[in-house]
Amino acid sequence: MDTASVRALLAQLPHFRGLPEDVLEAVVRIASELDLRSGDDVFREGERCSGFFVVAEGRVKIYRLREDGREQVIHDVGPGRTFAEAALFHRGRFPAYAAATASPTRLVKLDATGFLQLFRSEPRLGTSMVGSLCTWLHSLLEHIETLSIVSAGARLAHHLLRLPARQEGETLVITLPVAKKDLASELSVTPETLSRLLARWKDQGWIEVDASRVTLLQPAAIEALADTGTASP
Amino acid sequence: MDTASVRALLAQLPHFRGLPEDVLEAVVRIASELDLRSGDDVFREGERCSGFFVVAEGRVKIYRLREDGREQVIHDVGPGRTFAEAALFHRGRFPAYAAATASPTRLVKLDATGFLQLFRSEPRLGTSMVGSLCTWLHSLLEHIETLSIVSAGARLAHHLLRLPARQEGETLVITLPVAKKDLASELSVTPETLSRLLARWKDQGWIEVDASRVTLLQPAAIEALADTGTASP
DNA sequence: CGGTGCGTTGACATTTCTCAACTGTTGTGG
DNA sequence: CCACAACAGTTGAGAAATGTCAACGCACCG
């Protein structure tokens, strides 16, 4: 990944869209690249925040560790999105873990001190970051809404319908962006329950499952589940 | 509430702290006051976002309505905090309902169009709003962490320990800022379960409950619950 | 003084977690 | 290139937690 493509990646971000050339140039100068494979750490909870990140390719999961050692996946981030910008301003420490979940995963890192310096000298950076922070707020609200649904089935349905899907006639084809165990963690259910739910829906003829490709044969049935909060029969 | 006190309230907010006098003056000019009683609506989901709000006195709950008509409390906001600033920038519509939960509740409203205009002309506003948005992000992350705890007992314990408390010797005295049914909704449990949990803990000698005043007689026991995720015996 | 709604308690049904065993896949090292 | 280890995913059986329905006391407000 050369400087030009780093520059192109950054230029299309909502953070930096509309910035004058010279400022964008300055941002590119404090950028560095990371090449990761699935399972590699990006940062660990409590570490000093050394910058924030843009996903160029692949996937990153943000998670916390519970007392009993299990992971709680908070979010998963794909190409074109950023993460850890809140840590930069808020406390200076990462509030969670981050690790790549795809191979390869390429990130662009924007150095903390460099960025903060730039941020102070160029007020328009603040203006454009407000928008992206609001996007984060919005997605966290979505997540809270999902988690606050009591029934596991409804939670899964609600979440599935929010994933990027490709329409094929009557059906929706969804490729799960993360491993099923991470999806389960994100929904706060056990992998067993997730597996059973998918199996039941398959038996009902509502969906088709092939590894991480889920086909909604009857989207209406899934939507009904998500809305009502009713348990899955 | 006169202009001077509105001004004083705004000046102490992280949003506007450190702003030059004339800019602050301009912010005060687009501010208006709202006087509410418990149960009064502030705004409704889907409404055009006409501004954002600062709590001067009282409490406001932010919530959504589920299909079955029940409320899902997303957040509750007290004096000195702001809400709906994300709606302003993100989509221009309120993503949830807001209502006062205390009498009296006094709010300062900052007009949307006026503020956006100001925002464009004064880049430093963006800089300072980034900080407050990060505070919101942080509190939503906390909420997600609480919700993702499977056991209702642990969820309650986790949440209680994050409420403002007054230390009295060995014990912690917490005044619940909202009605128990709203607290239950925020924790995504039924009011019945909440009631039973508190009753059980009282029997155990861990807490003392007097209406909305909860005294943690053995904070260590509650902390253990919150950490382990273990169910309450 | 009566109504409305919050909070509590009881009995019961249901879901989901836990523990355990088994299968299939991936990728690593010989 | 293959064998084997490690781990994701599935399935089964039992236990425990929480939701549902229902009834009641109580406070607050009209």
Image (cartoon, coloured by chain):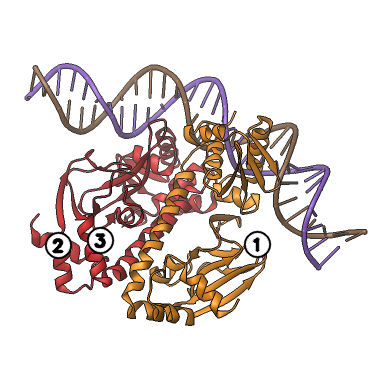
Chain colours: A red, B orange, C brown, D purple
Please, is residue A206 above or below residue D28 in the view?
Answer: above
Front-lying residue, A41 or A48: A48
Residue A80 on image: x %, y %: 24, 58
Q: Which residue is mark 1?
A: B102
Residue B224 on image: x %, y %: 51, 32
Q: State how far apart marks 1 and 2 are (Cα).
A: 50 Å
Please give the label number shown on residue A28: 2
Please, is residue A111 above or below residue B146 in the view?
Answer: below
Front-lying residue, A187 or B5: B5
Mark nearer the N terminus (3 vs 2)? 2
The quarter holding residue B169 reads top right
Q: Is residue B102 visible in this depiction of the protein?
A: yes
Mark 2 Cα shell of 10 Å, populated few (<14), some (14-19), many (≥20): many
Q: Which residue is mark 3?
A: A116
Mark 1 — on which chain does it sit? B
- Marks 3 and 2 share the same chain: yes
Residue A45 on image: x %, y %: 32, 42
